[in-house]
């Protein structure tokens, strides 16, 4: 029991200590982007790692996209959608985001080499983080259940 509690304490402290790292990824226009620049505007954010082959990822991002106007009336934040599709699927991922309209309201990043994914310790998608305005990870979850996205709003409200 003590070992379990120790493991949980280490896990919680690791999540609480996590920061958004500086990694180079690609924008929808093919330009290099340093993930540390996500912090420049001082807004909290949702960072969602996804891929075109992950149906739960797409459902969660669609749910966030649909709720975004209402959520942003309550909290000033941004959504960062990070595709982990490899370079072979990069053009598909970019056109997919445009077809969904995500580019209108999300910061779209493409991590074709999975450097950002590794730096954030993402093992599988979907993997979502809520990050405060200083870049500290305050909440994380994997998988998606319909309606579960509302928990993200509750965390953002507490920031």
Image: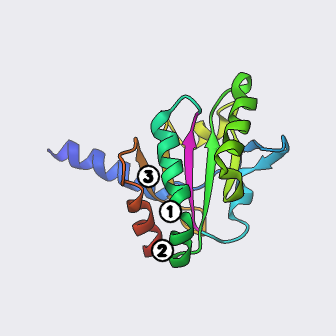
Q: Nearer the viewer, mark 2 or mark 1?
A: 1
Most distant residue in the left direction:
1
Quarter in which the N terminus is drawn = top left
Q: Residue at x 74, y 42 (%)?
A: 25
Q: Residue at x 64, y 30 (%)?
A: 85
Residue 159: image tag: 2
Report the number of discs: 3
* CB-based contact (under 8 Å), mark 2 and mark 3: no
Q: Nearer the viewer, mark 3 or mark 1?
A: 1
- Residue 71 highlighted magenta (yes or no): no
Q: Residue at x 67, y 37 (%)?
A: 96
Q: Is residue 65 above or below residue 127?
A: below
Q: Which residue is mark 1?
A: 67
Most distant residue in the top direction:
88
Q: Which residue is mark 3?
A: 140
- Depth order, front residue of 107/10: 107
Q: Residue at x 66, y 72 (%)?
A: 42
**Circle 1: element type:** helix
Q: Which is more N-terminal, label 3 or label 2?
A: 3
- Depth order, front residue of 12/106: 106
What segment carries the magenta color?
44-51
- Depth order, front residue of 89/44: 89
Q: Which is more N-terminal, label 1 or label 3?
A: 1
Coordinates of residue 55 in the picture (x, y in percent): 48, 34
Circle 2: is it few (<14), some (14-19), or many (20+) Cα within 10 Å?
few
In space, the residues marked 2 and 3 are separated at their CA atoms by 14 Å
In space, the residues marked 2 and 1 are separated at their CA atoms by 19 Å
Q: Is residue 120 above or below residue 77?
A: above
């Amino acid at each position: 029991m003590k070992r379990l509690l120790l493991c949980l304490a280490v896990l919680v402290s690791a999540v609480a200590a996590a920061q958004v790292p500086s990694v180079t990824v690609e924008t929808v226009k093919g330009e290099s982007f340093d993930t540390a620049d996500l912090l420049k505007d001082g807004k909290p954010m949702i960072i969602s790692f996804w891929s075109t082959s992950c149906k739960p990822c797409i459902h969660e991002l669609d749910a966030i996209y649909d709720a975004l106007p209402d959520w942003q009336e309550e909290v000033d934040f941004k959504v960062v959608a990070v595709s982990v599709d490899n370079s072979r699927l990069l053009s598909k991922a970019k056109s997919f985001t445009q077809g969904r309209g995500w580019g209108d309201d999300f910061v779209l990043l493409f991590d074709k080499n999975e450097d950002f994914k590794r730096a954030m310790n993402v093992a599988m998608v979907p993997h979502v983080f809520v990050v405060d305005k200083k870049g500290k990870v305050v909440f994380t979850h994997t998988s998606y259940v319909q309606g579960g996205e509302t928990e993200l709003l509750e965390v953002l409200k507490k920031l």
